[in-house]
Amino acid sequence: MHEVVVAADREALAQLAAEFIARLAERSEKDRFHMALCGGKTPRLLYRKLASPPIVDEIPWQNLHIWWGDERAVGPESRESNYKMARETFLERAPISDDRVHRIEGELGAKRAAVEYERTLMSQFSGDVGFDLILLGVGVDGHTASIFPSGMDQLSEGRPVAVTHGGTPPLDRVTVTLDVINASSQVVFLVEGQEKAEIVERVLMSDETLPASRVSPAAGDDHLHFFLDRAAAYELDRLAER
Ligand code: 6PG
């Protein structure tokens, strides 16, 4: 059974998720812990907490490799860059060396950036590409990473990386595919806000028309975690009361 954690508010959500991530990284017996980040607004507070005491002192940064689940086809200084957001909210302040931060080079354009990212992933992972932990958000349309409802079925062609187009503003994007997400050892959704309550209910009710509903870790359903704030869990509460 997947885990659903409901936090009182967005501050508590970020704190609980940061503690969860620190525990995962700390308990990993591996000398490399591959963590893929998501973009958007939701993870900002979480990322700040990862690089602030006490959490920053609990994470074995010497083991961490940072990746992205998706990126917009923009440069690292663009306000739309997921890399820029992560750099400014935590990478600049965390004790992690640049050679362990594997950004998607959106400035190359989506097609070339996807080829380069796939090459880097294949060089780091022998066999199936899968992270130790991947963080995911959910859009109000049920997209996750940059896998959008339209064209979702074309994405699982056995490739780890794909090019898509969408989001707000609509941009060319590079995304890992569901193959990679589901090959990852731990999958964490981070969702906040009343505007996500309806889509959260649809995802948790396994509405297969939604990319986020297709997330199903091969490691087992107990490797899938939904970290929600009370507002995003609103419809679940109503469901439980029925
Ligand atoms: C992106 C993200 C995307 C995001 C959702 C939720 O590049 O935009 O990876 O999948 O997680 O759109 O975004 P918010 O957190 O801003 O609601």
Image (cartoon, rainbow, N blue to C red):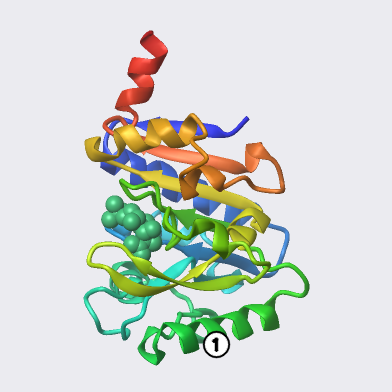
Q: At 38% across and 36% down in the image, what residue appears?
A: 200
Does the closest atom of ligand 1 sit within 8 Å of the Cβ of label 1? Answer: no
Residue 104 placement (x, y as % from top left): 45, 80
Could you say where residue 136 lies in the image, as x and y percent from the top left?
45, 54
Answer whether residue 76 is visible to the viewer in this image: yes
| Circle 1 SS class | helix
The picture places residue 65, in percent across and down from the top left corner, at 56, 73
Residue 50 x %, y %: 40, 59
Please state, as top left, top right, bottom left or bottom right, where the C terminus lies in the image. Answer: top left
The residue identified by callout 1 is: 116
Along the line of sight, the residue nearer the viewer: 222 or 111: 111
Eyeballing the image, is 10 above or below 197?
below
Q: Quadrant of residue 78 in the image?
A: bottom left
User: Viewed as shown, does residue 237 lie left or right of 116?
Assistant: left
204 versus 84 height, above or below = above
Along the horizontal axis of the image, is 219 left or right of 143? right
Residue farthest to the right, as pictured: 127
